[in-house]
Amino acid sequence: MTNRRSFIRQTAALLGSMALHQHAQAAFFKEMPPFTPTNGLVTDPDSEDDFWRQVRMAYACSPTLINLNNGGVCPSPRATMDALDYYNRMCNEAPSYYMWRILDQDREPLRHNLAALAGADPEEIAINRNATEALNTVIFGLNLEPGDEVVVCKFDYPNMLNAWKQREKRDGIKLVYTDLDLPSEDAEALTQAYVSKFTSKTRVVHLTHVINWTGQILPVRRIADAAHARGIEVVVDGAHSFAALNYKIPDLGADYFGTSLHKWLCAPFGNGLLWIRKEKIPNIWALLSNDKPDGDNIRKFESLGTRNFPVEMAIGYSLDLHNLIGPARKQKRLHYLKNYWMEQVKDLPGIRFYTSMHPDWGCAIGNFGIEGKNGGDISNNLFKDWKIHTTSIKWENVDGVRVTPNVYTTEAELDKLVRGIKEQAEQR
């Protein structure tokens, strides 16, 4: 049995050397037993910093800038970037041959691998460019009539709200907005905030699994069950939950689901995933042209014409690293990093959190404000004084700074964040 430190050393070497290996997952474990949280490795994130430092080596992290805005988009591992370069060069040797006759055929194995992570049937998975494309496909593809009601929330992502507003303007549907008092750890209150808006005219409820502004996790399954009991369909925006939280898509109880793979899966920029429950596929019209736009084949949602094959094919290398870490271990680490800095500043005078510290209600994303200061100024000062990259959020009742570490983030970097926050709290 390989001991812990030997495992770490071998993993670091393999992450750097297997960039273009066609079967990287098998290569990782060729000389080692498959990793599980119970095979002898420590699972408490606080005591396995060595492991995460080796994971950090898999990324091209800046030595001068601290990136704590992974909530926007995540960087790809070195192996993924090398694969992307390799596929780009391959395609440019003979584009029509390598793109259409080689890489286009490799989408099916990729579909199966993504379906395994999602816990879904491969025939329910479409690969596209981002969560906006995935969810707009559903929003514009649903058969809705004038007067039909759709329940949404003001905390939903703007691209999705704007798509629903376009349907409202064009087709005469009615949007009904639910109000949320966030942060919240009250499953019943969050559920009732949606259920109270359901009427006999409600056809769809749109749910954001993890709210991008604050990191609030919604009890999606509970709301979905209540919706289905009333014959209401459920659309879930999983942009900030997929590959960050440990779950399978069907477990959410949704009918339709979209996510961006360039977020927590760390795939190349411009990759997304659409999941539709198999029996629901014929209900959704293809967003782009297809010879069978109302057919039952999930591939009707992939009619993009000439697409970026290298970007798509490199997804598999990010998937390998994600699987090497393990979904449960990754979620635990992300939550640990968020609470690591929040615990150290929670008692500062004037500090306010817009995010729960409970693992059921928040994971990687944390949002804080300081009384008497606006989020934009706090974020700008963190960058000016400490070269810490965050983003300010001013949305509804939120006026703060969103801090989003990733698996490559170190405690030392978060210690600098803590010092920067304390400095500004003292100056308020």
Image: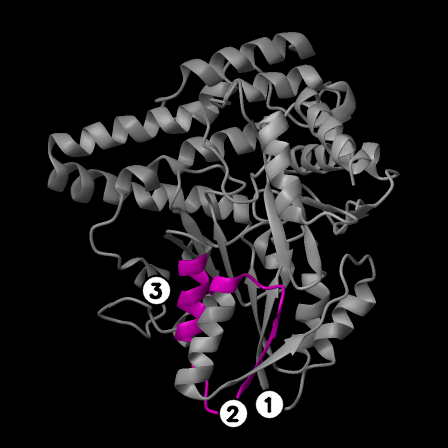
Q: Which label belongs to residue 147?
A: 2
For badge 3, the amino acid type reads: Asn
On residue 201, which mark appears? 1
Look at mark 3 in the image and give the residue it sits on.
Answer: 297
Between residue 127 and residue 355, name the one nearer to us. Answer: 355
What amino acid is found at the position of numbered circle 2 in the picture?
Answer: Gly
Q: Earlier in the sequence, mark 2 or mark 1?
A: 2
Task: Name the mark nearer the viewer: 3 or 1.
Answer: 1
Q: Is residue 258 visible?
A: yes
Amino acid type of disc 1?
Lys
Image quadrant holding the N terminus, namely top right
Q: What residue is drawn where x is 37% and y is 61%?
A: 298
Q: Tell me the residue at 45%/71% (across/down).
A: 163
Please state which of residues 155 and 242 is positioned toward the viewer in this rendering. Answer: 155
Q: Secondary structure at mark 3?
A: loop
Q: Position of residue 348 (x, y in %)?
A: 86, 38
In percent of the image, x 71 and y 32: which residue is there? 337
425 shown above or below 219: above
- Boundaries of the magenta span: 132-159
Depth check: 426 or 324 in front?
426
**In terms of sequence position, does the residue under pointer 3 or pointer 2 come before the other?**
2
